[in-house]
Amino acid sequence: MDGSLVLAGAGLGLLIGSFIGAAATRLPRGENVVTGRSHCDACGRTLAIRDLVPVASYLMNRGQCRSCGGAIDPAHLLAELGGAAIGGLATVSGGTISEIAIAALFGWQLLLLALIDLRHYWLPPKLIALLAVTSPLLLLLTPPSGPYLLERLAGGALSFAMLAAPALAYRAIRKREGMGAADPWLLGAIGLWIGPMGVVSTVVIAAGSGLAAAVVLKLAGRDVGGGSALPLGSLMAASAFAVSCVTAFA
């Protein structure tokens, strides 16, 4: 793999990650993601170009606004680093330029969903719908797509049922929700990208990661009980991209 191509993928990922960071902070507040100048969340000052350099601006300003000293949301830094990592990993996984682009698009969509769910326990339905729609569309644009499309559609349906069935059973027995209403829809959308076998691995990894996180929180003195919540959507998103990378490397 050409190192310059990997750097290009990571560099593009930095820029995409910058947009993802802005979207992750604006969408929960009901703000427009596409229009409007970037500004400090604390004082409202419009940011200059020197404040918008991915990662570097955050580090040089020590995570603070140059005008008011207010803290810059670390979600921006996390999104930029995550976007770069996804761009680099998608490139390293090999394949044609179109295959690299598709892998990166999958990862970047998951990153946005993961960040929002991690911070707000909310998975925007429109973003899930976008994730679900892009996979079949991309398959149709890269023939031969027939057998793969049927497999992905079956994977999406089975993936949705995999979480929807236990969620309905839990609600019937316990008379309350056991997971977010959007979690089955997210897993269904993921199934459209990586198929049924990939989803099984995703669920296993996400469950293991959630259990490990609960143990760490418990050891740190946090109250972790039956009523505690973990961002399952974030865990599934991270696990799904990991599974897609391992599959590509294999």
Image (cartoon, helix red, strand yellow):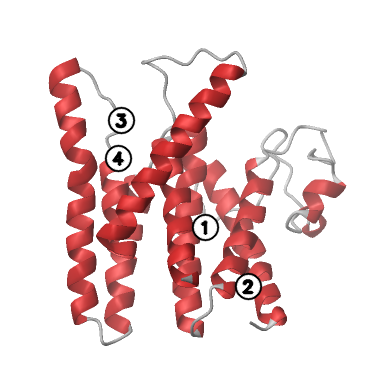
Which residue position is annotated with label 2? 9
Q: Secondary structure at mark 3?
A: loop
Q: Give whichever of 135, 214 is nearer the camera.
A: 214
Q: Give whichever of 223, 30 is nearer the camera.
A: 223
Rendered residue at 23%/19% (across/down)? 176
Tell which circle, 1 or 4, labels the residue nearer the N-terminal end: 1
**For the residues marked 2 and 1, what is the alpha-carbon distance in whole angstroms?**
23 Å
**Category of crowding for the residue at label 3, using alpha-carbon neighbours closer than 10 angstroms: few (below 14), some (14–19), many (at least 20):** many
Amino acid type of the residue that numbered disc 1 sits on in the rendered structure: Val
Q: Where residue 66 sits: x, y (%)?
A: 84, 41
Pointer 2 with pointer 3, Cβ within 8 A: no
Pointer 3 with pointer 4, Cβ within 8 A: no
Which residue position is annotated with label 3? 179
Rendered residue at 44%/29% (across/down)? 230
Pointer 3 with pointer 1, Cβ within 8 A: no
**For the residues marked 3 and 4, what is the alpha-carbon distance in whole angstroms?**
8 Å
**For the residues marked 1 and 4, what is the alpha-carbon distance in whole angstroms?**
24 Å
Amino acid type of the residue that numbered disc 3 sits on in the rendered structure: Met
Tell which circle, 2 or 1, labels the residue nearer the N-terminal end: 2
Q: Is 103 drawn above or below residue 191 in the view shown?
A: below
Tell which circle, 3 or 1, labels the residue nearer the N-terminal end: 1
Amino acid type of the residue that numbered disc 4 sits on in the rendered structure: Ala
Which residue position is annotated with label 4? 182
Which residue position is annotated with label 1? 34
Quarter that holds the N terminus: bottom right
Pointer 2 with pointer 1, Cβ within 8 A: no
Q: Secondary structure at mark 4?
A: loop
Q: Which mark is residue 181?
A: none
In this rendering, position of residue 187 left or right of residue 38:
left
Q: Give whichever of 61, 160 is nearer the camera.
A: 160
Give the number of the mark in front: 2 or 1.
2
